[in-house]
Image: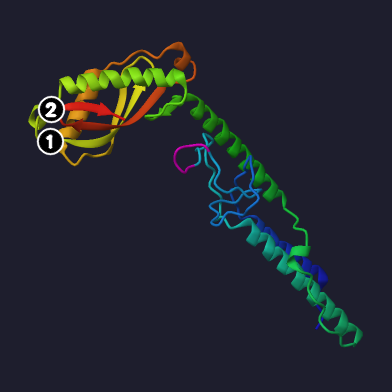
Amino acid sequence: MVVDPGRQRSGARHGARHLADQRLEVVLVNAKSHERPARAEVLAQANLDRGGTVDEERRARSPLPVTNPPQPGRDLAATERRVRELEARQQELLALARAAESGRAQPRPHAAPAEDIAPQPSGRDLADLALAAMRLQAQIDRQIDDYQKRPRKKFIGANAAEYRFAQYEEDWRAKVERIGTLNYPAEARGKLYGTLRLTVTIRADGSVDSVELDRSSGLKVLDAAAFKIVRMAGPFAVFPPAIRRDTDLLVITRTWFFGQGDKLWTE
């Protein structure tokens, strides 16, 4: 059997072109890690395990319009692997054809390992990668812009290390405990006691942004009383310049104790 080399090369190029027309959106990362992620979620030019700065797992959406490919996308690695297989098969067929023409039986040569053959990206591949890079740049710009617009938060607990926060929290604590003791829930006086954990977020002007119950006391009357006491104690002091310079929201988390003697204290 005589195999036309030109036809084989044409067939391989046609197969490669068909596979190269498949599009794949990739992600370009601006950092890398030494270890490969145990479960990769996207393709990128480098390994990156547990990256990112946002609160939840997501990627910023690009403001550029999404261009749907004419055919369903396929993994670029699979495309390149298929092209290498076609090229290797072509070489085998050419070798057999030469052996048949010369009348000498020759063993089939070993195909070159797929990883030793340098992939040659097509013009379409390069164009798709360039478009992906443009989309990623738009995503990065949008993410940076969104991040810069986010309120600057500072989280403090019962042991605030910096004096500028410690003094503000101490004043906040004293006011909450004084208001809470004076307004101990009537239905709980002399009979209901308990502890709960509460997180209060305060704006720079001293107003209350939010109140969250982290751990319930198990008594609805005490949980509700804690929320009411925060509302009654607010607004709190305006942030001093030392805090305002880098903080928009101050998040205070403390444990509240409704104890004997109908007193409230926090830790």
Q: Which residues are magenta?
A: 53-58
Q: Is residue 203 visible?
A: no
Asked if disc 1 and disc 2 are in contact, CB closer than 8 Å, the reply is: yes
Report x, y in % for residue 44.
62, 48
Above or below: residue 75 compared with residue 202: below
Dot in front, 1 or 2: 1
Per the model, the C-alpha gap separating discs 1 and 2 is 9 Å
Q: Which residue is mark 2?
A: 185
Q: Which mark is residue 192?
A: 1
Instruction: Give SS at disc 2.
Output: loop
**Local crowd at mark 1 within 10 Å, few (<14), some, or many (≥20)?**
some
Taking depth in this image into account, of 251 and 144 the one nearest to the observer is 251
Q: Quadrant of the C terminus?
A: top left
The residue positioned 62% from the left and 37% from the top of the image is 134
The residue at the far front in this view is 261
Decide which of tag 1 and tag 2 comes sooner along the chain.
2
